Image: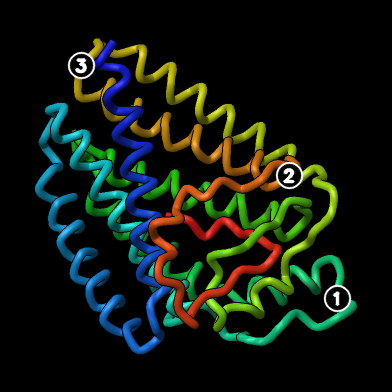
Amino acid sequence: MADYASPIIFAALAWWLSTGAIFWLIGRPRATFKWTALGATAILVGATFMLVSLRADTSVTGAYAGFAAGLALWAWHEVMFLTGFITGPSRVPCPEGLTGFVRFRAGVAAVLHHELAIIAHAGLLVWLSWGAANQFALWTFLILWGMRISAKLVVFTGAPNLVDQFMPRHLDYMKTYFSRRAPGSVFAAALVTITTVSVLLAFAAFGHPAGSHASAGFLLLTALAILAVIEHWVLILPVRDPSLWGWAMKPASSATHTTKTKTDWRA
């Protein structure tokens, strides 16, 4: 049983701690953001070297290390976005009255540079991982990317339970691109897709011997996908958002503030 429970617990704790660490750093004064970005870049370089060094590692430890490297690689993008260093060519609120594709195009302009950076990085990781026996760093990164795109589409098209208390003040204009309304087909499609991915990953995990490299790695990814399902439900259900990262929000700084909307910029 421990062979199945340990990866799930590890993934949940790693996700919680890494997300909290980012919230804590973004909650510091803006004067510290350049150091935060430099530190995140140093971690990015280290995680990239780790990904390469793990190419032939098919041990259980290698699966855990690959997962951790994937989280670190993704965290760089979250840090660069939340500090405001990489967002998009448009840094103004969504003009009133925009609908349909015109509104979507305006929303894309607000995050375009960030999304292009992720695409370029994903391509590099695919190249570095091509033919590798251990690709769990790559798959962790790709799943986190998919989670983020899905959540952004949901909050853009309609999510009634938007409660954003972690968005930095300098990104307030981003909130004007979100919609507080009943969820529609986008949410349904996102939920079905993520749930299906979770089930497929679980089948892959249980299709390998317990305690093996593949079993541990796929269980780590399964836990991550399940967390995405939970986060999507939190966006629409009338439930109070738990203070999972209260420790990361102390002391509060002028960089962040609490409002009644919530987005899914989590690592």
Q: Residue at x 90, y 78 (%)?
A: 97
Label 3: state its secondary structure.
loop
Mark 2–mark 1 CB contact (< 8 Å): no
Label 3 to label 2: alpha-carbon separation: 37 Å
Q: Is residue 18 left or right of residue 210?
A: right
Q: Residue at x 57, y 56 (%)?
A: 264
Mark 3–mark 2 CB contact (< 8 Å): no
Q: Residue reaching furthest right?
A: 97
Label 1 to label 3: alpha-carbon separation: 53 Å
Locate residue 43, reporting x and y percent: 20, 64
Q: Tell me the quadrant of the picture where the C terminus can be found.
A: bottom left
Label 2 to label 1: alpha-carbon separation: 23 Å
Locate residue 242, reporting x and y percent: 56, 46
The residue that label 1 is drawn on is 98
Locate residue 228, reporting x and y percent: 53, 40
Asked which quadrant contains residue 117, the reply is bottom left
- Give the mark toward the camera: 2 or 1: 2
Q: Residues within 10 Å of mark 1 (few under 14, many from 20)?
A: few
Q: Tell me the quadrant of the picture where the N terminus can be found.
A: top left
For residue 174, above or below residue 195: below
Mark found first going from the N terminus, 2 or 1? 1
